[in-house]
């Protein structure tokens, strides 16, 4: 999506939006109900990537389809693609849709496109950005910490893995599930709600995103799998059976790094400023956090999380052929059941 001006966000208490005061009639069949990130969603758009729920009279989030003005009124940040005002934003993704996100409660989707963009919108593409960029903005409007991680329920508690794009987060989570039977908690994004007694990790959609060679290595058939929006050799396993619906505290965050040459895999505990930096680097769509939570509060939340969990750096060869061997530093620790180095 377009770049976002990371102006300091005000510490605002979200005001109820106009849409929030409307009641969705229980018999209104235009809405479907889902759950993700510990939230209940009432949506006019079908979201097969999410776990379905029975009808709710007052969902936490409402997703509506309809027409939007080209620009958000009284915007403090305004470009042809993006406008922001207090705890609201609107952005245009060419060839997909226009989205408006308000007060951490409401998402509106306008699928009207200009003639130059054509008239056909792939529903999977639309849902990808709705559950990605739009939902990321909404989570930051609630002043939560969405983390770009894959997380696994290990014998030593929930461990999260982060790193640069292509670092192997999903591959590692899938390997641990298929090799050791450990449940996947979340893939791509999980959420921490600052201020709770324990740093509970609330999982996102139960979906694994795996490269073609990883699927082959794990013996998973690609037939019928959805391709990733931007990576043609990456596939989505939606509603994957390997996920758990339990919510537990995040115990450990591991930064994945590529080892050099014949360097052996290593796991190193980090603390203090370095641990804080790893937590902040793991933030999902940090530009939204800068805007809606504000730099000072965002850093405070990141610092508190870094002090409440253990943080490691994990360097290993970047090769599927050596996955089992390179996992030794992790599995020796995890199967020991202590969670300490």
Image (cartoon, rainbow, N blue to C red):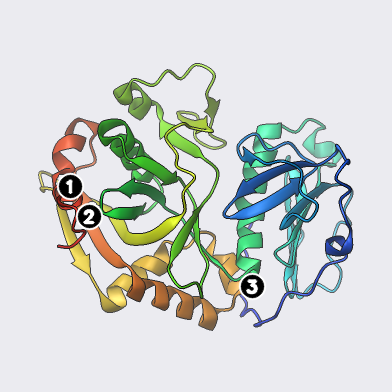
Q: Which tag is nearer the camera, tag 1 or tag 3?
A: 1
Question: Between disc 2 and disc 3, whose residue precedes?
Answer: 3
Question: Between disc 1 and disc 3, whose residue precedes?
Answer: 3
Q: Quadrant of the C terminus?
A: bottom left
Residue occupying the point 63% across, 47% down: 35
Residue occupying the point 17% across, 56% down: 267
Q: Are marks 2 and 3 in contact (CB under 8 Å)?
A: no
The kind of secondary structure element at disc 3 is: helix
Q: Which residue is mark 1?
A: 335
Please name whichever residue, 52 or 315, is drawn nearer the observer in this view of the structure.
52
Position of residue 181 measured from the top left corner of the image (x, y, whole percent) = 30, 35
User: From what the image shows, is residue 305 above or below residue 257?
Assistant: below
Q: Which residue is mark 3?
A: 292
The kind of secondary structure element at disc 1 is: helix
User: From what the image shows, is residue 338 above or below residue 123?
Assistant: below
Position of residue 278 measured from the top left corner of the image (x, y, whole percent) = 35, 66
Q: Residues within 10 Å of mark 3 (few under 14, many from 20)?
A: many
Q: CA distance from mark 2 to mark 3?
A: 32 Å
Residue 32 is drawn in which quadrant?
top right
Residue occupying the point 42% across, 18% down: 221
Q: Residues within 10 Å of mark 2 (few under 14, many from 20)?
A: many
Q: Which residue is mark 2?
A: 314
Query: In this image, 285 relative to 114: left or right?
Result: left
Q: CA distance from mark 2 to mark 1?
A: 17 Å
């Amino acid at each position: 999506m377009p770049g976002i001006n990371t102006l300091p966000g005000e510490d605002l208490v979200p005001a109820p939006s106009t849409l929030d005061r409307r009641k969705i009639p229980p018999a209104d069949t235009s809405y479907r109900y889902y759950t993700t990130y510990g939230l209940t969603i009432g949506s006019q758009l079908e979201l097969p990537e999410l776990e379905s729920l029975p009808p709710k009279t007052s969902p936490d989030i409402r997703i509506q389809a309809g027409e939007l003005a080209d620009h958000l009124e009284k915007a403090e940040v305004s470009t042809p693609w993006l406008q922001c005002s207090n705890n609201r934003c609107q952005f245009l993704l060419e060839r997909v849709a226009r989205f408006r996100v308000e007060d951490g409660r409401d998402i509106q989707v306008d699928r009207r496109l200009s003639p130059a963009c054509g008239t056909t919108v792939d529903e999977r593409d639309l849902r990808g950005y709705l559950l990605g960029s739009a939902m990321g903005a909404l989570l930051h409007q609630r002043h939560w910490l969405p983390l770009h991680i894959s997380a696994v329920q290990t014998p030593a508690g929930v461990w999260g893995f982060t790193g640069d794009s292509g670092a192997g987060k999903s591959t590692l989570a899938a390997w641990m599930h298929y090799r050791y039977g450990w449940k996947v908690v979340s893939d791509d994004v999980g959420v921490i709600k600052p201020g709770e007694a324990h740093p509970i990790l609330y999982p996102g959609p139960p979906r694994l995103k795996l490269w073609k060679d990883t699927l082959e290595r794990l013996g998973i058939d690609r037939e019928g799998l959805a391709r990733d929006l931007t990576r043609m050799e990456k596939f989505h396993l939606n509603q994957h059976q390997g996920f758990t619906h339990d919510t537990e505290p995040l115990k450990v965050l591991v930064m994945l790094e590529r080892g050099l040459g014949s360097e052996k895999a290593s796991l190193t505990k980090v603390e203090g400023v370095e641990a804080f930096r790893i937590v902040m680097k793991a933030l999902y769509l940090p530009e939204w956090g800068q805007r809606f939570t504000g730099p000072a509060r965002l850093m405070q939340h990141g610092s508190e999380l870094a002090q409440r969990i253990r943080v490691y750096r994990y360097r290993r060869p970047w090769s599927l052929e050596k996955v089992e061997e390179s996992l030794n530093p992790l599995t020796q620790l995890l199967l020991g059941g202590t969670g300490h180095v």
